[in-house]
Image: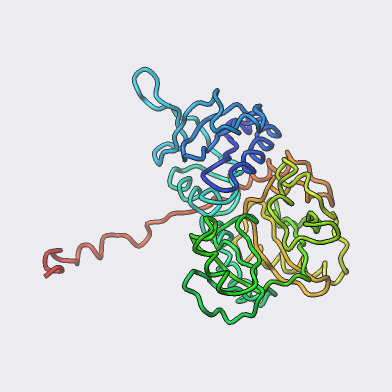
Amino acid sequence: MADALSDVAAVFGGPSPEHDVSVLTGLQAARALGIRALYWAKTGDWFEVDPGLEAEAFVAGVPRSANRVHLSSDGGFQGEGGRFGKARSLDVGVALLCCHGGPGEDGTLQGALDLAGVAYTGPTVAGAAIGMDKLAFGALMHAAGLPALPRAALDRSTTDVGLEGPYIVKPRFGGSSLGIEVVADLATAAALSGSSPHLRAGAVIEPYRPDLFDVQLAIRTWPELALSAIERPLRRAAKPGSEPEILGYLDKYAGGEGMVSAPRELPAALDPALAASVLEAAATVARLASVRGVARLDFLTDGAELFGNEINTIPGSLARYLWIDPPLAFATLLADLVAEARARPSHAYTVDGADGTVLKGAGAIAAKLA
């Protein structure tokens, strides 16, 4: 392991529906850089694992050869204590985050690492939260004057959203296509929001436009803002001679490589004016959504109109397959993420202003409760 990366660890897994894809991304990253691997189990427990393991080692859960570790606010990642029970520091200075969805991508893990003093790649707490909340991200697009389909919050008591059906219903706090459904009417959508395990934490609803197809590109922010080639992911045919309703989870990940082997048109054959609009919107979103690291921005289009859909702040395979013009080696992409984590801190706490003046003049607490 190169000295410059001796304190770097790929962090992957987590209690998320996208746990399996995260394992693939993490193993790819650990192997590409020759760094240690920290596995976040579905149970929430942490383990150090051999970075040379294959995906099948995680099918049944924690690999047999794994060693339990802990994430502590006092010292970061630590191995279990030895004979006298004293924990040992793993000396992880930078966490290369490969966690998709759930608490690994919504700001939860980022906040824990901030408190533990561990630098990390990818979004900050605020950037992760914005990216994971589809309602907030849609509102951000509208507020900035960027094109986006109308979107509303949905729960089982919703009776009016001011939109005409058919509808598409999505998890409000989901990072992939899991839980997305197309429905004909609002009553069905409301019932689904209360019964689907992917929608119970929150759901959004928007008009379903069967004429729209997906296009997407990657954004990276170090050493400078850069945009990838534009991709048109291709859908599996639902039935002979027909098109599926949406780009689904299996369209993206069934190839077993975290989107690397998914069918696609790359670069997408788009009208030059539409392609220019995609690039312009992506640069604007990068500033508005506090993008840090590498992210994937997804759009919907009919070939003429463009609508912003969502942003994935820790995308599958870290969007490595999109960097074709000019080609970018995966190891270079990862090394740049690590360099950004060191040079561009995710947070800067301050106690300026907390000088005791308010406390000195506060008087007795008992008097304030009277």
Q: How is the image coloured?
A: rainbow
Q: As drawn, which residue projects farthest toward the top?
A: 83
- Vertical placement of residue 180 versus 71, above or below: below
Q: Quadrant of the N terminus?
A: top right
Expressed as whole percent of the image width and height from the top left, the position of residue 58 reads 60, 32
Expressed as whole percent of the image width and height from the top left, the position of residue 293 reads 64, 51
In which quadrant of the rendered view does residue 176 lie?
bottom right
- Vertical placement of residue 359 versus 332, above or below: below
Along the viewing direction, whichever of 35 and 311 lies nearer the viewer = 311
Expressed as whole percent of the image width and height from the top left, the position of residue 233 reads 78, 56
Q: As drawn, which residue projects farthest toward the bottom?
A: 162
Along the viewing direction, whichever of 141 and 305 lies nearer the viewer = 305
Q: Quadrant of the C terminus?
A: bottom left
What residue is at 44 percent from the left and 43 percent from the top? Answer: 116
- Vertical placement of residue 124 versus 95, above or below: below
What residue is at 65 percent from the left and 60 percent from the top? Answer: 311
